[in-house]
Image: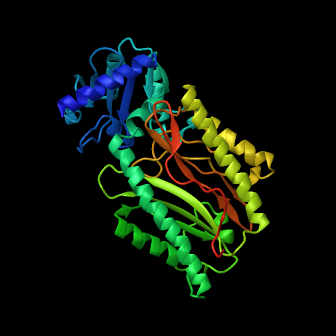
Amino acid sequence: MDSLMSADITGIQSDLRAAKLDGWLFYDFRGRDPIAQHVLNLPEGMRTRRWFYFVPAKGTPKKLVHKIESQSLATLPGETLQYAGQDELRENVKKILGRARKVAMQYSPKNEIPYVAMVDAGTIELVHSCGVKVVSSADLVQKYEACWTLEQLESHQSAGVAIDRIVREAFQLAAKSVREKKTLTEFDLKNWILREFEAAGIWTEEGPDIAVNAHASDPHYGPTLESASPIREGDLLLLDVWGKKKTPGSVYYDITWMGYLGAKVPDKYAKVFGVVREARDKAVDLIRKSISAGKPLQGWQVDKAARGVIEKAGYGKYFFHRTGHSLGERVHGNGVNMDGLETHDVRHLIPRTCNSIEPGIYLPEFGIRSEVNMYIGEREARVTGAVQKEILPLLA
């Protein structure tokens, strides 16, 4: 345990020096900051009082814990200070910060990136009162929360092979049911996919989202027994399917494909899909070129590239979610999102992370989305699965 934590602290300090920061101040109260607990690899334990852990860019870390929980950070290296009363707490916060003048915390200016905004405003004020400037730890967090190991990338690719096959076969089942005039609802198809997941060793927290026609206009529509529509000839069918291998540490694969229950896709659907496809490809190309050239790229810039295509085509108000999200051990990971709408994500795309790229247009009568996953390497970025070019004419 000690050697693992020493390696982690050494890495954090190297990152702090590269970012020209004096340190990273971790703080938690009753488990409000899961990021701190994960980055510091803290075991379960009783921590009912406030604690601080300061990792300086150089030197020995310092702990500040309550006297009745003096061992709450015992697994971490560094000098331990204790407090009981409020005045002692404030005095010791200043002591552990020492000469630091610019530190990172789980904070986001104006809450622009709520995924890392774990520290309350009062605690930020307390640190400011020590003469210290607080900056966001958002980019630091990514390295410890969102970067994949080689084994995780392999698990993503393995899940992708199974999920791509299951999606193809789900479309085939829908077409077969229509041809044979058998009743198949959105809910039936969802349950069929989940049974195939079980057989393939794939697991998901929730989903998949199976939607026809106007149901596809709700980006998070999930069919229930009561809400499900039957899948009929002439329907537009959206399959948003995500899952991961059941092995520990596995990461998600998450895609959306579109099919039409007919022999020829109507122009009204093909036209909108063409706009969505262009937006998707614009984002993908921007990422590829930027990573290849070694140019820094932020999440909001990817969103802007995709959104610009949809706005130019006149559908801007019908694209009301971010362009993509971080993928990890949870389907919505803790890395940068492709987002300039819901948030202004200034985090950078960094090596060994993966994101969805999934623009959509949601008209009142139907919705269309296309989703791929994009892995960022050291000097290259690539889509990890099949890429849809046209809506599939399922009865052709």
Judging from the image, the colouring scheme is: rainbow
Q: Indicate whether 119 appears above or below 255.
A: above
Is 128 displayed left or right of 238 in the figure? Answer: left
On-image quarter of the N terminus = top left
Residue in the picture at 23% in, 33% down: 73
Q: Position of residue 115 (x, y in %)?
A: 49, 42
Is 358 displayed left or right of 135 in the figure? Answer: right
The furthest residue to the front: 396
Q: Indicate whether 237 appears above or below 126.
A: below
On-image quarter of the C terminus = bottom right
The furthest residue to the bottom: 181
Residue in the picture at 77% in, 53% down: 315
Quarter holding residue 171: bottom right
Quarter holding residue 218: bottom right
Q: Position of residue 59 (x, y in %)?
A: 29, 14
Residue in the picture at 61% in, 42% down: 284
The furthest residue to the top: 99
Q: Position of residue 137 (x, y in %)?
A: 46, 29
Foreground: 205 or 117?
A: 205
Foreground: 332 or 34?
A: 332
User: Is residue 341 among the parts visible in the rendering?
Assistant: no
Quarter holding residue 174: bottom right
Residue in the picture at 74% in, 64% down: 269
Number of numbered discs on residues: 0
Q: Indicate whether 272 appears above or below 178.
A: above
User: Is residue 188 among the parts visible in the rendering?
Assistant: yes
Foreground: 200 or 104?
A: 200
Q: Indicate whether 222 appears above or below 228.
A: above
Q: Position of residue 128 (x, y in %)?
A: 47, 21
Is 199 displayed left or right of 333 in the figure? Answer: left
